[in-house]
Image: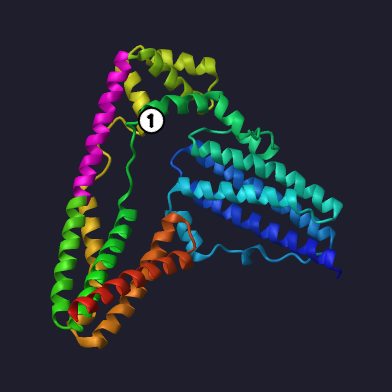
């Protein structure tokens, strides 16, 4: 096989694997979508990736390239976990970036085989449509289902996106309302609690170990450090969740006041939201006028669009407190455990090893939500632990001496 033919083969096989993986990811995200229209859009994207795969398989057949078994293409367990747990908006952003990379590679790296390049360019147009559609989904818009396969979704440039249209006008309105805020789930908070507890108490244990040579004082200091960290995080999470609810209540009260004071501007804002959902300008205005016959209904409709709910309660403070406190205690106790059984420099070495392994595990767990590589996130966290532990241990040695 010539080098050129080998290059075409590798490009086709790589593109084929990308399409199979993209179909799996879109389907996994669609299963998590509560909005049936958004879920249908994601499933249509998965179907379009399937048609790309069919075209690639047909071309590989023409070139006599042996087709792999599709069952051999699997997402890693980590990527599958991310697709099931990570924030949907983050997953959509990653897919948007991947679609753009595929389109750019096709444009910038032709294979040299005319028929293959022609097919790739047809796929590129549809990948660009997917990029825009994903951006619209993240912005709250609902692109037309038919456009995802036809490639007729317009690919707007930055100037066009900023200068006009419902999204730009809506952004300008929301940009003036700086008091909008959003909430977060307790699972990422629990992971960050374990992170904080581990890092803080590892620093305490390392510092006291350096100062005392790993005496029983390390156990005392570590235990009280773990208790203090857990209680601090628990009370902090409780107060933060209560504050989030209070801020949401204040936002809703402010929105209620806006509806009563500036009904025309609020009606325009709601109409823009509905245009982004697929209504024409005339249809959106008609719906809003009907809703606005009752100011309370207008307020509730706007609150649902802007905040997701007209209810100020955003989360359970007790649940958040328990999650933060327990996870922090779990992370904080890890560096202390060896000193229940052993002291001296052997205890220091074991505690350091166990703690750094735990640092890697917590860093990898965080990557489920940040969508980074588990190895890079884990190693970064481990390096941070080495820096913290090393610095406090040396400081402890200096103080002890």
Q: Let me know if residue 335 appears in the view.
A: no
Horizontal side of 77 relative to 253 (left or right) equals right
Q: How many marks?
A: 1
In the image, what residue occupies the spot 26% across and 70% down?
203
In the image, residue 43 lies at what x, y percent? 57, 45
Quarter of the image containing the N terminus?
A: bottom right
In the image, what residue occupies the spot 27% across and 79% down?
351
Q: Let me know if residue 120 appears in the view.
A: yes
Q: Main secondary structure of the magenta part?
A: helix
Q: Which residues are magenta?
A: 237-261
Where 220 sits versus 283, above or below? below
In the image, what residue occupies the spot 35% across and 19% down?
298
Where 83 sits versus 96, above or below? below
Q: Secondary structure at mark 1?
A: helix
Q: Nearer the viewer, residue 268 or 171?
A: 171
Q: How many other residues sit within 10 Å of disc 1, few (<14), some (14-19) or many (≥20)?
A: some
């Amino acid at each position: 096989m010539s080098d050129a033919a080998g290059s075409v083969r590798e490009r086709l096989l790589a593109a084929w694997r990308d399409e199979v993986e993209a179909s799996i990811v879109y389907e996994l995200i669609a299963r998590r979508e509560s909005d049936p229209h958004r879920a249908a859009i994601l499933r249509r994207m998965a179907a379009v990736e399937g048609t790309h795969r069919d075209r690639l398989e047909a071309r590989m057949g023409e070139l006599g390239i042996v087709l792999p078994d599709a069952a051999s293409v699997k997402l890693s367990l980590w990527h599958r976990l991310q697709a099931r747990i990570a924030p949907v908006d983050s997953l959509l952003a990653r897919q948007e970036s991947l679609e753009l990379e595929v389109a750019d590679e096709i444009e910038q790296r032709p294979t040299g085989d005319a028929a293959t390049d022609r097919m790739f360019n047809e796929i590129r147009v549809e990948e660009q449509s997917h990029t825009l559609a994903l951006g619209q989904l993240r912005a709250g818009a609902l692109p037309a289902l038919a456009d995802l396969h036809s490639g007729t979704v317009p690919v707007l440039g930055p100037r066009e996106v900023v200068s006009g249209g419902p999204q730009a006008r809506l952004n300008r309105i929301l940009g003036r309302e700086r008091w909008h805020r959003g909430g977060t789930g307790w699972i990422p908070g629990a992971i960050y609690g374990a992170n904080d507890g581990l890092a803080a108490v590892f620093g305490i244990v390392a510092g006291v170990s350096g100062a005392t040579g790993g005496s029983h004082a390390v156990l005392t200091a570590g235990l009280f450090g773990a208790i203090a960290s857990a209680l601090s995080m628990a009370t902090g999470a409780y107060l933060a969740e209560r504050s989030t609810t209070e801020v949401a209540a204040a936002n809703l009260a402010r929105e209620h006041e806006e509806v009563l004071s500036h009904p025309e501007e609020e009606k325009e804002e709601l109409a823009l939201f509905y245009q982004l959902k697929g209504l024409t300008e005339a249809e959106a205005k008609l719906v809003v006028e009907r809703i606005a016959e009752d100011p309370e209904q207008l307020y509730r409709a706007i609150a649902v669009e802007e905040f997701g709910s007209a209810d100020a309660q955003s989360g359970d403070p007790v649940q958040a407190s328990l999650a933060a406190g327990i996870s922090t205690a779990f992370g904080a106790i890890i560096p202390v455990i060896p000193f229940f059984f052993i002291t001296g420099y052997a205890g220091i070495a074991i505690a350091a090893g166990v703690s750094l392994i735990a640092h890697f595990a917590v860093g990898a767990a965080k990557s489920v939500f940040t969508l980074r590589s588990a190895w890079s996130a884990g190693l970064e966290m481990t390096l941070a632990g080495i820096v913290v532990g090393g610095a406090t241990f040396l400081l402890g040695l200096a103080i002890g001496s």
